[in-house]
Amino acid sequence: MTAILPLERHFARVGAPVGGVFTERNLFPWIQRRTRPLEDGPAAAARLLAERRPGKRVAYLHVPFCANHCLFCGFYRNRSAEDAMAEYASRLERDIAMDETAAGGPPIQAVYFGGGTPSALSADDLHRLVSAVRRHLPLAPDCEITIEGRVAGFGDDKIDACLEAGANRFSIGVQTFDTGLRQRMGRKASRQETISFMERLRDRDRAVVVCDLILGLPGQDMETWRNDVATCLSLGLDGVDLYCLTLHDKSPLALSIAKGSLPPAAGLERMAAMYGAGLEMLEDAGWRHLNQAHWASATRERNLYNQLVKAGADCLAFGAGAGGLVQGHRYVIQPDIDLYGKAVDSGTKPVTVVLPPPANRQARDLVMGGLEGGRLDIARLESLTAPGLAATLEPLLAQWAAAGLIRRRANAIILTTAGWFWHCNLVGSLFELIDLSMGGGTPPADLSSPQPQGIRHAG
């Protein structure tokens, strides 16, 4: 039998508007703050990576350079400089080539070049890095290889270099098509320049093209937001991400709002309304809702990297500041590009921090992966935790259904539009209750998953 659980503290407000169901959003429930790193972290990571285990794998490559610091971004590290980026690309290529442990494991299903701004690299460096991945890593025949980029500085020569080397997916951080909003947020290209870029990328018809949009920006009203989604639909792209703005502490955007240079960001009620409007427009157009923030127009777009990472797949990490996952252990590569380079030059994988797996890892992976996809099998969850968990959770699930967050179907819960908006809160609640049901007390902490490395503007 499971322990008596404090369900009431996870109850939602019944009858409230979507934005008022909870008082605040639990932005990253997988980020926890109490676990101590392993004392022999680098050695432990080396042992774990060398083990041959079945299971899905992905790879993440980090490019920590940007032409400028966009106001909304909390991940900026290094300003683009041609010589520094060329040197870094050489070391990143060496990092990939010397990782012999990667070659012996299961096929890699997806590769993600994130940042930063991977498209800031030269055409030659983009070609050599994609080629290095294909040459040295055991890619699945249908491996998804994504290049994250932005409109400014991503010329035809760079796009063609990526395609010729074997990239088959582009994720472009548009964020908004509105010229005024783009310029205030640090984006240089105008609306028409952005549309023209996306059309040229689309018309090549050689790779999946995905557009990132952010809702809740200062000065962004519902009409502007609807126009952004409508523009995306009119372009005939393969996929779109609708991200709620995350206001990072001490980011340029937060500081600008604090000084009064910009109006406040949208509150929860306005963001919930925008999210719901975007979801409705995409579903009316026949797009498929793959996970909380992502939609696909057709079967060409799979969004493999993000879906597999959220479900707990191993993630091989390459590049300064990259985050990886192996057998539930989170690890981080040295973020300082000079120290990273020295380690790679000496033939050492520069792992700096390794955290042990969280308690009840399999159950947590099921919750995270399931609710990211909008459906969680409660009977299966009970099989991974303790007998009687489903009955113990029943009052909470009934309360969430009354609040309009979920629907019931056989042994599963299905997210509604409100549930999609608040899905991280539901994940966080279930994480805590699972741990308590297993006698673990407060859940142990954990590093963030590699996912935020690949999606730098996720909300």
Image (cartoon, rainbow, N blue to C red):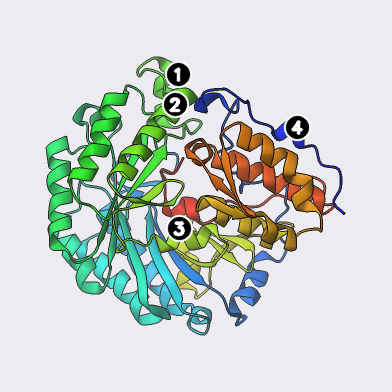
Q: Residues within 10 Å of mark 2 (few under 14, many from 20)?
A: many
Estimate the spatial distance between the alpha carbons at disc 1 and disc 4, rounded to whole Å.
35 Å
Say the numbered circle drawn on residue 258.
1
Q: Return the x and y of residue 282 as percentages of the image width and height.
A: 32, 43
Q: Which mark is residue 254?
A: 2
Which residue does the numbered mark 3 point to in the structure image? 306
Mark 1, Cα crowd under 10 Å, few <14 / some 14-19 / many 20+, is few
Q: Are marks 2 and 1 in contact (CB under 8 Å)?
A: yes
Q: Estimate the spatial distance between the alpha carbons at disc 1 and disc 3, rounded to whole Å.
A: 33 Å
Tell me, yes or no, whether the two marked residues, 1 and 4, touch with CB atoms within 8 Å.
no
Q: Tell me whether circle 2 and circle 3 mark residues in contact (CB < 8 Å).
A: no
Q: Look at the numbered disc 4 and give the secondary structure of its residue.
A: helix
Q: Which is nearer the eye, 38 or 420?
A: 420
Residue 62 appears left or right of 154: right
* Residue carrying label 4: 8
Q: Residue flagged by tag 2: what amino acid is it?
A: Ala
Whether residue 448 sits left or right of residue 458 in the image: it is: right
Label count reads 4
Task: Find residue 400 and report its image quarter.
Answer: top right
Tell me residue 311's x, y (percent). Answer: 55, 60
